[in-house]
Amino acid sequence: MKPMFPSYRFAGMTVHPSPTPQRTWTLLLFAIAALLTFGAANCTEAQVVGGGNTGNQYPPQNYYTALEIYRDGDMKNAINAFESALRSSRTDVNGKWIDAIPVHAMLAECYWHLGHLPLCRTHLDAGMQITVRNRGWLGAIDWNGLDQGGAIRAGATNLWPEANAVRLAPVPKGLMLHSGEILTEQRLQQGGRIENQNLKRVDAIEIMRSIALMMYRRRVVMGELSAQEPLAAELMESTKYPSGLNSPGGRSLIGAMRGVGQLAVSEDSTVVDRVGKYSTLGGAVHPITPLMLLAGMTVGVSGDATGALDPNMAAGLVATSQQAVNSAAALEQYEFIGEALQLAVGAAGPQQYGKVEQTALLAGRTLIRESRLASLHCYLVAADAAISAGRVDAAAESMTLAIEIASRRDVDFPRLEAYGAYVAARIAAARGESLGGPEGKLSNAMGSLNEFVNNRRDRNRPVISMPSHYQLSLVQSMMGRSIGNQSTKSLLDYFTSPVSLPTWRRDPVDAIALIGLDSTPLHRGRLELAVAENNGLDVLKSTDRIHAARLASALPLRGRLMDVRSLVTDPVESFWPSTKDMVVQPPQMIAELRQRVQTSLREGADDTEPRAAAVASVQESLVTQIALQRLRIPSICPPSVASEDAAALPPGTGLLTFVVDGPRLVATLSRDGDTTGWISPAGRRIPTMISKLLADIGANRSRGKRLPDDESWRDTAAKLKEVLFPPNSGWNETGLENLVIVPDGPLWYLPFELLPASDGPDVTAEENDDAADDAEADRDPLSPGQLWADTIKLSYAPTPGLALREVGAASEANRVAVMAGTFFAPRQKELNDQMIEEMLAAADDPLQWTIGSAPPTDRVGLGVAHLIVASPLTPNVTAPMATTTIPSTTSTPRSDASGQWDQLFGWVRLPAGGPRTVALPGYRTAAGAAKLGDGSELFFPLAALRCSGVKEITLSRWVTGGHSAATVIGELINETPHTSLASATRRGVSLLRQAELAVAGEPLLGKADEDSQDITGNQPLFWATYLTSGSIGLPAPKSDE
């Protein structure tokens, strides 16, 4: 299927400015409305931006020609024309003069629309530097030419009535500028730039408008970072009111220019004040009016301190957009019409969508001959407003009109086409498609979006196209210079928090780009700060977000859809305070979906048949529609770590976390109300040591004898423990009964159960040697030392948040379903079947499936509470989320019209609910191979299944099979319904360690092992493979911190 916009893909944004009190802004809106009254007058002379002058001009005539080409939509020729105008502009020994400022401003606009932000920034800086270098030029203007005549009516008659009625201030096409100086012999001897005193007619108002435009676009591109670089402040300093200026018109226009400029230095409250004072001149609009209103709207869409907009504020912003549209049309500044309407649709509520849509359609139809740029943007906004109001067919009609314009050969606006792709994606979702579902128009639209955001190129070299990405590059460079700077911390908080409402309102495409950013480097930056400050709690929180980001990286929209699913699935009492408010008073579509999901969880609670794919498809379509709306969706799944969590841990319970940070390993331990952290500098040695331990117990041996001849593995485990818990860690096992471990990287393959136990603070091997003589009398030489498996109840979690809390909904039934293959006696089918029957005999009405008869496990009925897959299962290492929870007998995965079955991708999608426990005792990981991986094949199944609502999971690190596996699986089948999966697994392992085994009954063993005597299940090869994942089960925190 062809993409919605075949040439280009994704779009752009703005970072939210400081919030402005809504009351102040609302009062100013009424003031602006009163000033922008419309009347009739005879046309005499008016400043119409884009008009031309004869003779020598500043800016040159070809600048105005280029402006017309730009507005028509031919971007390539517009750039050529502006570059020609730049060459024609005045040059002296100091470089370009002020007549080059408008050219640089418009070249920046061209590259903004093309998605080349580095070149956009280059021209913004160049134009601003010219302004700073020529400070004082405003004082050389003869402002008396402004204060002549009365307001006149716009000359155009081909616009809509409101635009035709706009009154224009009598701004002349040029003002005289005093240039040069009286040349004397002494002045000539001084050298430098020498110019005789003369008068020049310059289009000073167009130059001022261009300065305002540069400052506006700088804020859009750089966000609040614009204020942290001195150039914007220098420009504001260089454009102060000239001394002795007594022209009311001059003061108003300079005030308007500087008012827009305040946006670039983050003086947002001043912007609002200047809009009220200078957006009109004597009650009529002037050439800077549209930009002033745009700047005011940019501040206004920020809402209050929480980002909220009350209905009156939203209505006022929409009204302001109408004024901006009409004034821009009357002034022939068509390029600002669509931008104003896009801000309006972002701020609008259900009551205002119709008004925005009708205005956009009217402008789009009227301006098709004057400006295809404006017409395209207007039709896209009309489609956006219609789909926001739920009018799918009307949105599709407007989109069709936009596509007709965008498809023309000489129209080139990639950024607008990316915005169109966003709207097209929303239309496709409203018609039943979903992200992560079968490919269609939605996937094509999102692919176009992603192409523009992440793969924009210039001469085959990648360039940054999105403001959020550009700002992130600036933040990362700042981090390198000042890692502890407080402003850097706040910026890290911004980029690692859910996308704000103001960002969504200003530009939804850039909001999606911000969602799509890989936040891992930023979380690692926060980790670096926490380590430097020796703040154990912050290290724990950063570790949690690094692991959560790992899961998000494999999900559509980096987990935003999964957060939506949690909003409509999880119990209200499980949410953090701020999220609970969103569920108690939800937006309409979230309320509708939550009601559907909660109803589905109650209906069919005892049904073991798979849930209907059609119902799930409708629910997933709603999830996608919500995810693409202008909403701030909080990070819910995986849950975060709260500041109060360490104090809430039960007595005797600890949370041990690890994160690989380059060559070192960063660890934390939370217990007894405190969180401490330490660093193991030997991070690069750990994978080798783990491989040696696995080899010592026989787990990763593929040939020869697998059973070890001695217990040298205990020494290897002891050395590993010393590396993981160096002396400065303060590790102490006294009183530790339960320990939840969050591994990272190769630590996923380490059976922590094999680490030696200690009664008090750990000591090194050398200290043990020194104390050996003293302890010899008390030591039984025939009794091996105890292991962690003997003294501590261990479990594992993919993230610290999932170690602390449960998420999602699961079956409340108690029935066991077993999918068993030839796992126990691969070469003896009858014996294998007999063993399965014996394991099922004591269970209470179990379901027995074969590989061929098993239903899609990602949609299994709510009557199935415990799922056990007793068969070898190989994960998808290259795409872990494509791993299936059931083996396939063919090369083609099981599937139907709704998509492939059993994949982890499907588990995290709706329908909500599923098995309460999942056991995969035949799971195969790199722990059984010669080379370790990064732990993905363990991390992703645990994370995905837990986020789908599964409460407990048991996996194997390597496959055993045979009687040893039957001993454990038999306990899982019989005990899990009556206790917990963790307890059943521990009981099964305990029985296995006491059992006698035979080489013939263990598929792992071969002829080389036949000489081994007295084989028992106490060999780590048989029992250390199992790990269990669950949570401590803390309630929701009382605070959002």
Image: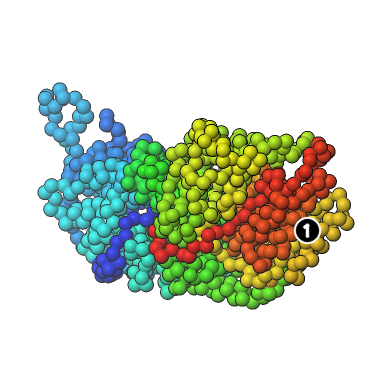
What amino acid type should be assigned to the residue bearing mark 1? Ala
Residues 959 and 311: in front is: 959
User: Quick one: quadrant of the N terminus?
Assistant: bottom right
Count of marks overlaid on the render: 1
Residue at image coords 70%, 41%: 699
Which quarter of the picture shows residue 714? top right
Residue 314 in the image: x percent, y percent? 37, 69
Residue 933 in the image: x percent, y percent? 63, 41
Circle 1 sits on which residue? 820
Which quarter of the picture shows residue 392? bottom right
Residue lying farthest to the front in this orientation: 777
Indicate the secondary structure of the residue bearing disc 1.
strand
Residue at image coords 20%, 32%: 195
Residue at image coords 56%, 45%: 757
Residue lying farthest to the top in this orientation: 189
Residue 235 in the image: x percent, y percent? 26, 44
**Residue 625 left/right relative to 978:** left
Residue 793 in the image: x percent, y percent? 58, 54
**Residue 983 left/right relative to 308:** right
**Residue 999 left/right relative to 479:** right
User: Quick one: quadrant of the C terminus?
Assistant: bottom left
Type of colouring: rainbow
Residue at image coords 73%, 48%: 1017
* Res 905 visible: no
